[in-house]
């Protein structure tokens, strides 16, 4: 049977789409990139370090290593934190890159169910740690949709189980904040990425994220040893100091051979260009403005969906970065399936998305023995959830159109 190709039409004309997310590039961004194109360095130049410093200034992390993409950031981090055979608690509600990075290191992901807000259930993590004890070596969590996990609970895990490595996959969450209080300290507000209760935080700068470098990512840490290891792994495992082969590094008079470098690790070409970093520097300056607009739009969605069949994933949270605006609908009560709903909205020019398919149900993971886990919240979430358009340049008129069409199709 030949499948018919659908022609998407909207109020703005044929083929015009309203995506679930998109980048915003202005003249300042273009100017920043053009300046690099006219400079002496297109890659491995001064803009890389400038971008890394800007990330540290924004998040309050001590070190940042910019890399080619978010998956590269996760890969490097996993190789640093994990050993072969380690058991790692992680979420099934993420892009596959999160758990894939655990496999890259020869470790084993153990999927933990999620909470109503889509984030990993840290209480269940604690239960599993108490059950398995020292077999659990790490937690790889995701701040899903830009909404931070319960950071006070994460701080509790950090204090009670200091031997467990913690990675925050903050691909959705640059610009997010959290409030924390330990013992009798006054409650404080910090930014995701400060690594206060983790060993590493990773970012992604893909175009659909809150800021973009085209493709790009970053590893953040407060640990100097992790920082140095990440720098080496980013660049083929090569160093230019602390050499082991002194007979090759120096001449007979003890002078350093100026051409010399040394590969000490099996590293990767995960470098990021100055062109990308110039864009990142410019974008980072606008991040708070981007999030402010997303907060405005999120509040409008919340008001439109109040006491209706469309349920926002969580009530408005001023600390969320709102990379995604996710809602849930109980399709089992309707005469339309979720797939039919997606197709009908696409015919109206609205491109919904699902974040995410349960990772443990992916065919590759099922071949590894996964797929039968008891994750009721995740499976229910998969049946009901979808992401609707939310991005800086989304106009109120377009948002009203989205809201109108959602209700029209669902009624």
Image (cartoon, helix red, strand yellow):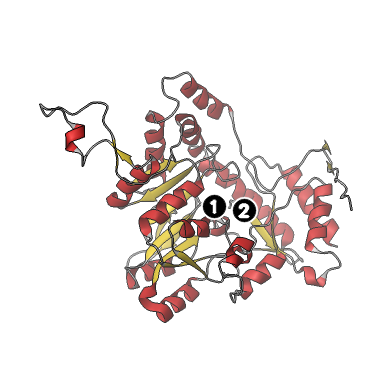
Q: SS class of the residue under badge 1?
A: loop
Quadrant containing the C terminus is bottom right
Task: Identify which residue, 239 or 9, lies in the foreground.
Answer: 239
Task: Answer few, some or many: residues within 10 Å of disc 2's Cα (few below 14, many 20 plus, some between 14 and 19).
Answer: many
Question: In the rendered structure, are the residues bearing label 1 and label 2 in contact, judged by CB atoms less than 8 Å apart?
Answer: yes
Q: Is residue 4 left or right of residue 137?
A: right
Q: Which residue bears the numbered disc 1?
A: 172
Place residue 64 in its image quadrant: top left
Task: Label 2: state its secondary structure.
Answer: loop
Residue, disc 2: 324
Does residue 293 appear left or right of residue 105 in this picture?
Answer: right
Residue 247, given in percent of the width and then of the height, sits at 17, 35
- Upstream in the sequence, badge 1 or badge 2? 1
Q: Is residue 405 visible?
A: no
Number of other residues with Cα within 10 Å of mark 1, as a class: few under 14, some 14 to 19, many 20 or more? many
Q: Residue at x 56, y 71 (%)?
A: 113
How far is the residue under mark 1 from the one under mark 2?
A: 8 Å
Against 309, residue 297 (above or below) is above
Residue at the farthest left position:
253
Badge count: 2
The residue under the point 68% across, 65% down is: 382
Q: Outermost residue, bottom direction?
A: 131
Q: Which mark is residue 283?
A: none
Percent of width and height locating residue 409? 84, 57
Percent x, y for residue 20? 68, 48
Position of residue 391 relative to residue 140, above or below, is above
Question: Would residue 379 be seen by someone viewing this image from the given angle?
Answer: yes
Residue 394 percent across, percent down from the top left: 68, 42
């Amino acid at each position: 049977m030949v499948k018919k190709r659908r022609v998407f039409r909207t109020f703005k004309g044929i083929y015009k789409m309203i995506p679930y997310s998109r980048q915003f590039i202005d003249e300042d961004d273009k100017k920043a990139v053009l300046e690099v194109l006219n400079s002496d360095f297109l890659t491995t130049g001064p803009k890389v370090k400038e971008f890394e410093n800007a990330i540290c200034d924004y998040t309050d992390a001590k070190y940042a290593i910019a890399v080619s993409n978010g998956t590269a950031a996760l890969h490097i981090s996993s190789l640093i934190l994990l050993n072969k055979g380690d058991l790692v608690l992680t979420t099934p509600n993420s892009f596959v890159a999160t758990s894939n990075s655990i496999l890259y290191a020869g470790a084993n992901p153990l999927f933990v169910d999620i909470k109503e807000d889509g984030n990993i259930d840290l209480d269940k993590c604690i239960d599993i740690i108490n059950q398995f004890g020292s077999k659990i070596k790490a937690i790889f969590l995701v701040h899903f949709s830009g909404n931070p996990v319960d950071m006070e609970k994460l701080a509790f895990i950090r204090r009670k189980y200091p031997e467990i490595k913690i990675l925050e996959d903050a691909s959705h969450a640059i610009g997010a904040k959290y409030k924390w209080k330990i013992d009798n300290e006054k409650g404080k507000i910090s930014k995701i990425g400060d690594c206060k209760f983790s060993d590493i935080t990773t970012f992604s700068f893909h175009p659909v994220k809150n800021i973009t470098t085209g493709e790009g990512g970053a590893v953040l840490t407060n640990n100097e040893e992790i920082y140095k290891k990440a720098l080496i792994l980013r660049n083929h495992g090569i160093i230019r100091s602390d050499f082991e082969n002194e007979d090759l590094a120096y001449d007979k008079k003890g002078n350093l051979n100026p051409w010399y470098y040394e590969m000490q690790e099996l590293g990767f070409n995960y470098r990021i260009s100055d062109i990308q970093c110039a864009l990142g520097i410019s974008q980072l300056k606008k991040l708070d403005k981007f999030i402010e607009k997303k907060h405005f739009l999120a509040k409008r969605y919340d008001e439109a969906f109040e006491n209706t069949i469309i349920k926002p994933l969580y009530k408005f949270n001023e600390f969320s970065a709102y990379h995604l605006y996710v809602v849930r609908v109980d399709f089992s009560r309707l005469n339309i399936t979720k797939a039919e709903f997606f197709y009908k909205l696409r015919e109206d020019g609205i491109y919904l998305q699902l974040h995410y398919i349960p990772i443990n149900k992916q065919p590759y993971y099922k071949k590894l023995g996964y797929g039968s886990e008891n994750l009721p919240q995740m499976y229910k979430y998969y049946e009901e959830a979808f992401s609707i358009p939310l991005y800086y340049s989304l106009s109120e008129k377009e948002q009203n159109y989205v809201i109108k069409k959602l209700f029209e199709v669902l009624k």
